[in-house]
Image (spheres, rainbow, N blue to C red):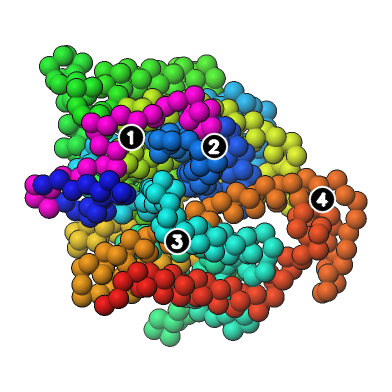
Amino acid sequence: MEVSNPKGLPENAYRKLEPGEEFIPVVPANKLVPELTAYSLLWGLFYAVLFSAAAAYLGLKIGQVFEAAIPITILAIGLSNALGKKDALQQNVLIQSIGSASGVIVAGAIFTVPGLYILGLNEQAGFFRMFMASLLGGFLGISFLIPFRRYFVKDMHGEFPFPEATASTEVLMAGEKGGDQAKVLIQAGTIGGVFQFMSQTFGVWREEFTTTTFQWGQNLSTKVRLEYNMLVDSAVIGLGYIVGLKYALIIASGSFLAWWVMTPMIGMLGKGVTIDGEVFQLAAIDGLSTGDIFYSFVRPVGIGCIAMAGLIGVYKSRSIIGGAFKLAAAEMGGGAKANNSDERTQRDLPMPVVTALTILTILAVFVFFWFGVTHKLSWAIAGLLVVTVVAFLFTTVAARAIAIVGTNPVSGMTLMTLIIAAVVLNAVGMTGNDGIVAALLIGGVVCTALSVSGGFISDLKIGYWLGTTPRVQQQWKFLGVIVSAAAVSGVIMMLDKIYGFGGEDGLAAPQASAMATLIEPLMTGQPAPWLLYMAGCFMALVLEWVGVPPLAFALGMYLPLELNTPILMGGVVAHLSTKSKSKEVEGKRKERGTLIASGFVAGGAIMGVLSAFILFIGRWLAGRAEWSTTLHDGTLVKADDWSVIHVIGTHRWVEEMPGSSLLGLAALVGLCLYMYRSTRSAARD
């Protein structure tokens, strides 16, 4: 049985297929429309450069790299509509696929490379090393993922929510169809964008609600080690809605265990525990904040849990991995049916080509490490083994994480990579500054590979729903990686010259700071928290045995509480707003709700880009101004502490007022009520 809807996305796009049922994409396999054109190629590359700069600045400033795919999709649709282009859907898919290389390359680069600057190893950085680490990691991510495309996007149809891909697809379809759906999307996108702009740029309310804003909350955190934190973010609420209640609950449960059970238990040791009349106390722990306890003692458990969940995923996918190797061997020997004989919408790059590209990339990594980093054969071989094994094994982990929750735990897997790299490099005698540089560059290659593979699976899922030729996406994604790698390397060098990284006046670069803090003691002989990593490994095994998805739970333990709570809120709204005794009513509500959630994600992402540019320009202008002012509480604020918004008169000290935290929470509740009521209005019981 075939189900196709020529007016939009097929009804069975997001659900599991019934026996004998087939999914027919928006553009069927037997229909040819323009995909790669000069128009789609040039605009894709333009957005790759543009969003590399914006994402790098914002990521190094606050540690959050926004998803570039959705704002690029919006801009592509707007441009094609303005130009009156016909058959623009597939061209817009290619623009999004090429341009979105910017966000994933940025995530791979800024999480590791700035650590060289933070540790004072500026002379060990440079454009060539940054560019090669990003380029080779990107190529590995694409090459390793291609053999698994069919499994994730076709064989597992309806099994994973693919929140980011869903949002982008809904945006593309609304732009294609226009009418009521476009109006709903534009309205939701405008509301989400204005919401984000009010908080991120103008500071009308705090970007995060936290109980520590209030005195009672500070007392609770100090005495009992309990906090509640929630990002006031329209895009994350939208993601939570798309993820759904099931996975949102699993993720939140991991977060609640980490923050509300394990952190208070460890904090109790700082207060002292009485056993048989004798008090046992670890005074050093009592001097840590609640957040410090989480990041120092609990998050490593989450890292170990992610690592073991990844290994479990690799084991469960062993037949898929083995099948990929068998297919490669068969095609190389001419004994298998070539991919180019399949139907157009399932046509990948030929396996011999993928195999050759993978081997050439691995050889290039080896040459880069030997002549560009270590200058010693045994050290280069050690680095190559770490990169190849870890990147290959965790490729499916990154893809599965994106498919489930839309968030790639790449920083956690990179931390694990740095630990493994440090152990291996120490074993072959590479220590000190040379070892630090090599480990960070190894981590950069792996981090970029996992980031690219996770992001690219979303692109391929979009293409699967809409009927894009996978081979075309795969071919030109390589070019997007090249351009983005060059752009982000130049931007990092520029930002170092303007601001620097770390310290009181530099960009915070939080992930790179964490990587630098981790790798320095490892390469100088100090111990790592191996027992905490092992605890996480055993936790993942227990979760797998009792039937709880360990990766989703581990993500909750690793990601900050403030990110997981709005995801849960979005999942709860999804459950309540679509619930009905009628399957038809549920379907209509789910379609409307997904469109609204996609609008929130799109509007929030676009305003994230705009805020990045405003903050960047404002910092540049303020840095050249010679003035200062005194706030209401007597605090002296210099020009370089202000953004362009402050210059025109809106003071971000409003964010520090307790009332602004409650205002932000009220605004978020209002956003959820709008989503609930609008979704239920799609159909009545």
Quarter of the figure with residue 245: bottom left
Q: Is residue 31 magenta?
A: yes
**Residue matched to label 4:** 622
Residue 560 seen: no
Marks 1 and 2: which is nearer the front? 2
Above-or-below relation of 445 to 194: above
Q: As drawn, which residue projects farthest toward the top?
A: 333
- Mark closer to the chain start, 4 or 1: 1
Check whether the beta carbons of the residues at disc 2 and disc 4 lie within 8 A of each other: no
Using the image as rendered, state which of residue 373 and residue 498 is in the foreground.
Answer: 498
Residue at point 27%, 32% (across, down): 31
- Mark closer to the chain start, 1 or 3: 3
Check whether the beta carbons of the residues at disc 4 and disc 1 lie within 8 A of each other: no
Whole-number angstrom distance, CA of label 2 to CA of label 4: 38 Å
Q: Residues within 10 Å of mark 1 (few under 14, many from 20)?
A: many
**Residue matched to label 2:** 83
Magenta stretch bounds: 18-44
Please state if 153 lies on the left or on the right of 134 as rendered. left
Residue 47 on image: x %, y %: 55, 36
**Residue matched to label 3:** 184
Whole-number angstrom distance, CA of label 4 to CA of label 1: 46 Å
Check whether the beta carbons of the residues at disc 1 and disc 3 lie within 8 A of each other: no
Q: Amino acid at mark 4?
A: Ala
Above-or-below relation of 311 to 672: above
Q: Residues within 10 Å of mark 2 (few under 14, many from 20)?
A: few
Whole-number angstrom distance, CA of label 1 to CA of label 2: 22 Å
Residue 189 on image: x %, y %: 51, 58
